[in-house]
């Protein structure tokens, strides 16, 4: 009986980010994942940090080809990128096997995940029933540290997690994703993985006021300090990062405060 070689279907991996299509972190992620399957990149044409899980409904969007299987979405968000990629670049019965958003330049810890366009891209993936995770590279005091460290540890983590998901399956149920943060250390100094909860960020209103050439005031948001509450909570994502661990936080899209339902019912009936 002649030997018949089975056709091995390559895994389909879709990646996006919120730093823009030229981001070194995005290109590093694509490089790390190529041994695992067919990588398609769809990323915003410009930086879309802090755009959360927003999609564009007030104007048309346009794919611009950068290279083979690499597109920038003109003025699109990470969620737009994932949504339209699934809708137009993949056949209906051949969705991506995995969606990864990153590697973000900077951490996505604590309640910042509600602002994060990186996390928003992964959220869009799980809404379409696709295993998804967001991955971000933390740095402490300056972007010079990021230049010094590069993305070596983040690339290794992204590869290892993607390989595990593709080979063993996703550990979470529907509408759940993983938020991964990489400590600002060299790979040799990493203590391993730590599954964490979302920490608590201390927020202060911060905006820089200036004037344009016509003397009109304008404000630039985003100058507040990176401060944390309960910094010693050993179960939190920020604690893990500070201790040299890769933080992996399971996140669910259902934000219902179930433990508060009875309390609100009693309050509304008074």
Image (cartoon, rainbow, N blue to C red):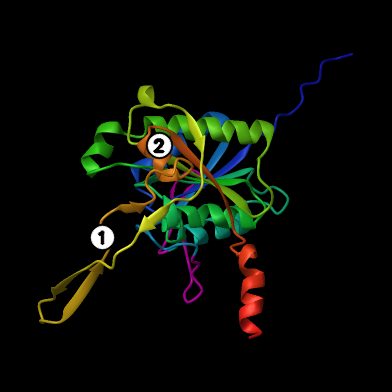
Image coords of residue 20 (percent x, y): 37, 53
Tag 2 near tag 1, CB within 8 Å: no
Q: 194 above or below 253?
A: above
Residue 72 visible in the current orientation: no
From the viewer's perspective, is the residue at label 2 or at label 1 nearer? Answer: 1
Q: Which of 54 and 264 is in front in this view?
A: 264
Residue shown at the point (47%, 28%) measured from the top left: 192
Image coords of residue 15 (percent x, y): 50, 46
Image coords of residue 260 (percent x, y): 61, 67
User: Circle 1 is placed at which residue position?
Assistant: 224
Local SS, label 2: helix
Q: 108 above or below 193?
A: below
Local SS, label 1: loop
Query: Which residues, given as a range, are shown in magenta?
Result: 54-75
User: Circle 2 is placed at which residue position?
Assistant: 28
Q: Is residue 183 magenta?
A: no
The N terminus - image quarter = top right
Image coords of residue 159 (percent x, y): 51, 31
Q: Is residue 54 left or right of residue 22?
A: right
Residue shown at the point (63%, 86%) measured from the top left: 270
Q: Nearer the viewer, residue 249 or 65?
A: 249
Residue 153 has which mark?
none
Residue shown at the point (13%, 76%) measured from the top left: 212
Residue shown at the point (15%, 82%) measured from the top left: 216
Q: 153 above or below 256?
A: above
Residue sticking out furthest to the top: 1
> Count the marks: how many?
2
Q: In this view, does 37 lie to the left or right of 182?
A: right
Residue 244 visible in the current orientation: yes
């Amino acid at each position: 009986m002649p030997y018949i070689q089975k056709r091995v279907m390559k895994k389909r991996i879709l990646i996006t980010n919120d730093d823009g299509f030229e981001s070194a972190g995005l290109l590093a992620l694509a490089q790390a994942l190529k041994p695992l399957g067919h990588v398609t990149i769809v990323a915003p044409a410009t930086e879309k940090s802090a755009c959360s899980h927003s999609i564009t409904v007030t104007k048309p969007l346009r794919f611009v080809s950068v290279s083979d299987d690499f597109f920038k979405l003109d003025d699109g968000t990470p969620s737009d990128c994932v949504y339209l990629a699934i809708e137009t670049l993949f056949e209906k019965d051949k969705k991506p096997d995995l969606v990864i958003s990153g590697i973000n330049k900077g951490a996505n810890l604590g309640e910042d995940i509600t602002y994060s366009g990186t996390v928003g891209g992964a959220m869009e993936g799980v809404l379409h029933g696709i295993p998804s995770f967001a991955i971000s590279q933390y740095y402490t005091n300056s972007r010079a540290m990021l230049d010094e460290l590069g993305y070596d540890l983040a690339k290794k983590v992204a590869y290892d997690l993607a390989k595990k998901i593709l080979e063993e399956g996703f550990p979470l149920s529907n509408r759940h994703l993983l938020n991964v943060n990489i400590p600002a250390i060299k790979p040799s100094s990493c203590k391993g993985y730590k599954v964490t909860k979302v920490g608590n960020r201390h927020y202060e209103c911060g905006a820089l006021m200036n004037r344009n050439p016509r003397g009109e005031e304008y404000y630039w948001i985003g100058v507040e300090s990176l401060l944390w509450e309960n910094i010693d909570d050993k179960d939190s994502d920020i604690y893990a990062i500070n201790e040299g661990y890769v933080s992996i936080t399971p996140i669910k899209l259902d934000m219902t405060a179930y433990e508060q339902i009875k309390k609100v019912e009693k309050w509304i009936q008074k």
